[in-house]
Image: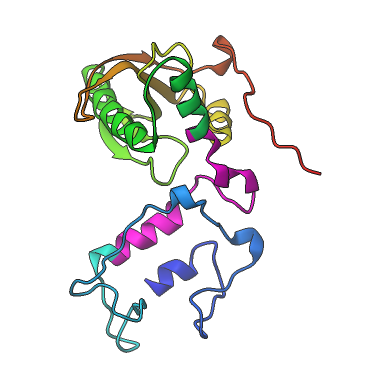
Amino acid sequence: MLRRLEQSSTKSFKLWGYQFETEAQSATLLPTYERKHKVAGAVKGGFGESNIRYFSRTSKETKNSAWMNDAIQYVLNYDRVNLLDDPSAEMNLEEAATVAQEKAAGFQSDPKIRKTIEQYAMKKAQEVLEERGFSKFDDTSATKPYDFTCWRKTKKFFVEVKGTQSNGKSVVLTKNEVKHVKLHPDDCVLVIVHSVKLTRKKVATAGTPVVTEKWDLTQGELTATQYLWKI
């Protein structure tokens, strides 16, 4: 596993009293709201009291735990917000803008509700895309500026899913999402699951999925809703 890390863009790090050393331009600092990846805790093979876990007991004996592989893949594949490139991202502008949009439309919204609707919309989106012949879904929402990759016949597609309690006439996009769609318009699919309902126990129900294949941003109106002014 050390060899796999050394082969990535993070090179020449040394384990001398700290975990990694790398050039600033090769580093990624996650905003607080992106720090969701969980690693094994108080279980056999997990972290100990010192909160440190080594890859091997000796130079020859490795500990090839599944959670270690997952953690390494998460690090190597992460391509979402980087605070070093976008210091304003800590404010979670997408979340704030989405909540404001839904509250303005008269709906109750907070981060927990947003997460519930997001997970529900992902499930609905996969179901409707499977009906259209898409398959081999891979959830990339934790590391990429799109929620799924999937295939239809021999072609790969990138899928962005937006779930909302509103009528879905407008959705909030991040800077990274816009950049990716502009680079891959013929390969991007947008699924908006609108009119999602919440029960008294905050369980998501209903919702109507609307699919846009060959997602071309020029076919709609892209409006700047947030600005960062640096002095």
Q: Is residue 83 above or below residue 40?
A: above
Q: Residue at x 44, y 57 (%)?
A: 76
Q: Position of residue 113 (x, y in %)?
A: 33, 32
Q: Of residues 111 and 131, which is closer to you in this image?
A: 111
Question: In the image, which residues are magenta?
Answer: 68-95
The quarter of the displayed image where residue 150 is located: top left
Q: Residue 85 in magenta?
A: yes
Q: Position of residue 158 (x, y in %)?
A: 41, 31
**Image quadrant containing the N terminus:** bottom left
Residue 90 in view, yes or no:
yes
Q: Of residues 157 and 126, which is closer to you in this image?
A: 126
224 displayed left or right of 59: right
228 displayed left or right of 140: right
Q: Position of residue 107 (x, y in %)?
A: 38, 19
166 displayed left or right of 26: left
**Image quadrant containing the C terminus:** top right
Magenta stretch, main secondary structure, is helix
Q: Is residue 195 above or below residue 113?
A: above
